[in-house]
Each structure stands twice: as C-alpha cells, then as structure tokens.
Image: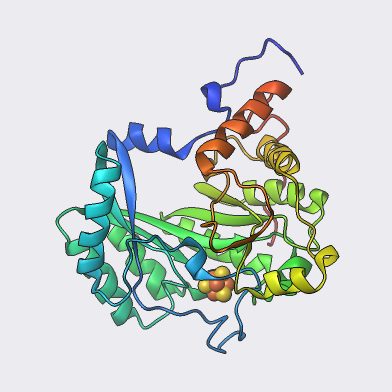
Amino acid sequence: MNPDAVSPFGPRRYRAWNEHVKLRYGGRVQKVSIEAGFTCPNRDGSVAVGGCTFCNNDGFTPGYLDRRQSITEQIDAGLDFLQRRYPETRRYIAYFQSYSNTYGELGRLRACYEEALAHPRISGLAIGTRPDCLPAPVLDYLAALARERIIELEIGVESCNDAVLASVNRGHDFAASADAIRRAAERGLEVTAHLLLGLPGESDQSMLEGAARISALPVHALKLHQLQLVRGTALARQWQRDPASVPLRSEQACIDLLADFIERLSPAILLQRVGSEVPPSMKLAPAWNLRLSELAPRISAELERRGSWQGWRYQPIASGPH
Ligand code: SF4
C-alpha cells in the first residue's frame, strides 16, 4: 500500500451516511422509531415459527416507545425525547423498525404509513422488512410515495451464505434478498441492506465474499451489525448450552473483521451503520461493550493504521443470477 495515499472519504475512511445526509438535506436527519403492531412470517408460521435465532426485537426498541399508543402519539413521544437529545436535527423520519413492516394487506400498510406521513414534523419513512415481504403492489406504492417524500427501504439480508441463513432459521436465501433489492431499485427506491457479521457457521472468507456480493447489487446503503447474543433468543440459549457452537469475537477481532469487510465493499455504497449496540440489560455476550460512538472511530483508526479505506480491496464481480 502507498503510505502517502490520501483517503477519499476524509478521516472516517468510509462513505458515511451522516455526512451524506447533511449534504443532501442540509443537516441531521433523525429517525423516530414506531411500533405499528406488525409481526413477521418467520414467527407466525407462514414461513416458519420461532423466528430467526438471533432475533429479539426488544434488543433494539428505544425506551421512549410505547406500543399501546397510536402512531401519531408514538411520534409525538419520540420527538419529545429526540428534540432534547439532538436539538440540531433538521428533519425527522418515522422508522417502522420492529418486525416486518411490509407484512400485511396493502390497505393496512397505507393506513400506517400515511398516518405517520400526515404528522407535520415527519419528512419521510424508513421501513424495515424481509425480502420475502415485498410484492410488486407494495413496491409500486412505495415508489410512488418516494416521488414526494423521503422513503428508505431497509431489507434484512443478514448473510450472503445460504447455509448460514438456513442454520439461523432465516426462512429465505440470498437469492431472495438479491431479487427484492433489484425489484425495489428498478422502481427507483433507495435500498439499505442489513448484514449481521459473525453468525455461527460463517467463515471470515464467506463474510468477505459477501462484501463483493452485496457490492454487485443496487444497494444504496448498508447497515453492518456485529453478532451480539440478546437474552431470550434461541442463539443465546444455544451459546449457553454449547459455547463452542457460537464463536464470539474479541473486541479487536471484531474491529479487524469490520475493517476487512469495509476494505472490500464498493466505495459507492453508503455505510449507515458500522456496528450496533444492545442495551446492557438485554445483552448476554460478548463481554466487551463498545458504544457505537466508540466503535466507529476505532474502525476508522484501524483503516488509518493500515493506510486503507472503503473499497481499497474492492474487486467487482458480475451480479449474476443471485
Ligand atoms: S429478524 Fe426479522 S425476520 Fe427474523 S424473526 Fe426477527 S422480525 Fe422476523
């Protein structure tokens, strides 16, 4: 590597979502989490029961959220909290985060989304879902909304390795993710993909190959999460029974992996998150605890130490059939 080369992404060394948003919208854009009462086909028996082995939605539900309230009331409560915490915020978008938020009749989806969009402080929506919950009528409707409002479609990919997806009871394969991402992007929707790095059975090599496979898709942004075992999940119970079956990384090994992944990711993809936090009361393992505000700079420092940045080792591959 050339030690004199200069990062095209500045000191962060990756294409950071927050900076993109500030340029695009003139300031901070904050998500207000909404719980609209959806479930998911991986829990209700349509695809599977029990859900993904790593999933407990309480692990990322903010404290201000009260599911018993209407969507409008939830937005008001979220704004009350977030305005005090982030007074510099320019815009707010309603975040349909828990479970699969396109899993339902189109009429019900429209009612939920349009109640949120009718709130005078809400500029748009972020909608988290599974790739098998995006039929054409839903995508067409979201694409029409996106012509007027901010619409971020977040699709859980979680792994690019079909054996790993099967082992965590994900209920779909990578081809389903690739297909959903393509169908959304064809309609002009901006897709954020979620990946969970470090699932059991996933080798470093398959995760790093995943960087190339994700890069070959029309993905606008990516959220990376490191594996953390959340109380109440099947994966946490598996680890308690047989720790060797769920290998966990040390803090430095996790930072190394994230840096390796980012080096192999297309420089065109925005990184919306480079890790995740689980409330300490919900987390079982690993024992190390880095806030996201600490983890992100550690990744940048590791990339700086290497003299590299996002895309440094990126090698395009054909997008192929999946
Ligand atoms: S991660 Fe998503 S798809 Fe999997 S069980 Fe949880 S809500 Fe359902």
User: Is residue 107 visible in the rendered structure shown here?
Assistant: yes
Q: x, y percentage for residue 297?
A: 56, 31
Q: x, y percentage for residue 253?
A: 76, 42
* Rendered position, 105 above or below 18: below
Q: x, y percentage for residue 305?
A: 70, 22
Residue lying at the far top in this picture: please name it.
4
Q: Is residue 271 left or right of residue 258?
A: left
Residue lying at the far right in this picture: please name it.
244
Quarter of the picture containing the N terminus is: top right
Q: Residue at x 74, y 51 (%)?
A: 207
* Rendered position, 21 above or below 248: above
147 or 81, nearer to the observer:
81
97 or 207, nearer to the observer:
97
Quarter of the picture containing the C terminus is: bottom right
302 or 105, nearer to the observer:
302
Residue lying at the far bottom in this picture: please name it.
45
